[in-house]
């Protein structure tokens, strides 16, 4: 089942990260991954090999901003926060996801 968990995130990692960051203060990558796992009740897991390239891509797109700061354990970590452009992107991606999920639910119900 490990591979299936990763496959479930394909194409939706940006949506999940933007949603997590929209809920509060800036977070470092590990905390973002932990929060996704926690909120999904361990169904979704984000590996470093997927998360950090996505964070870099979103930073370059202007959806998030990053800065270096000390972590809770006094280690240097990059913290990310959502931007206004990221909030617009989140709204667009969330709308697309809800529309697709509704269509899939209709098919599953054979409506």
Image (tube, rainbow, N blue to C red):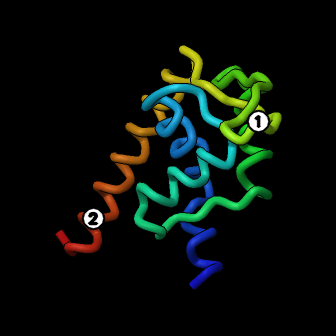
Identify the residue shown where x is 46% and y is 28%: 24
Q: Residues within 10 Å of mark 2 (few under 14, many from 20)?
A: few
Along the line of sight, the residue nearer the viewer: 72 or 11: 72
Farthest-out residue, left: 111
Above-or-below relation of 93 to 40: above
Identify the residue shown where x is 71% and y is 50%: 51
Above-or-below relation of 83 to 15: above
Q: Which residue is mark 2?
A: 105
Element under disc 1: loop
Mark 2, mark 1: which one is toward the viewer?
Answer: 1
Q: Position of residue 16 (x, y in %)?
A: 52, 46
Farthest-out residue, front: 74
Q: Quadrant of residue 69?
A: top right
Count of labels shown?
2
Q: Position of residue 90 (x, y in %)?
A: 49, 31
Above-or-below relation of 101 to 21: below
Identify the residue shown where x is 53% and y is 42%: 15
Q: Position of residue 42 (x, y in %)?
A: 48, 68
Element under disc 2: helix
Is there a contact, CB below 8 Å, between mark 2 and mark 1? no
Q: Considering only order in the chain, which callout, 1 or 2, is on the residue closer to the N terminus?
A: 1
Residue 74: numbered disc = 1
Q: Residues within 10 Å of mark 1 (few under 14, many from 20)?
A: few
Above-or-below relation of 60 to 53: above
Q: Position of residue 5 (x, y in %)?
A: 56, 72
Residue 47: numbered disc = none
Q: Quadrant of residue 111?
A: bottom left
Image-based side of 79 in relation to 9, left or right = right
């Amino acid at each position: 089942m490990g591979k299936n968990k990763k496959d479930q995130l394909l194409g939706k990692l940006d949506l999940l990260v933007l949603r997590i960051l929209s809920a509060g203060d800036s977070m470092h990558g590990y905390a973002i991954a932990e929060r996704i796992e926690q909120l999904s009740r361990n169904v979704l897991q984000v590996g470093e090999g997927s998360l950090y390239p996505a964070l870099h891509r979103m930073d370059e797109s202007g959806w998030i901003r990053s800065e270096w700061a000390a972590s809770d354990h006094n280690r240097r970590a990059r913290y990310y926060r959502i931007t206004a452009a990221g909030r617009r992107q989140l709204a667009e991606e969330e709308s697309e996801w809800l529309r697709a999920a509704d269509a899939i639910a209709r098919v599953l119900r054979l409506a």
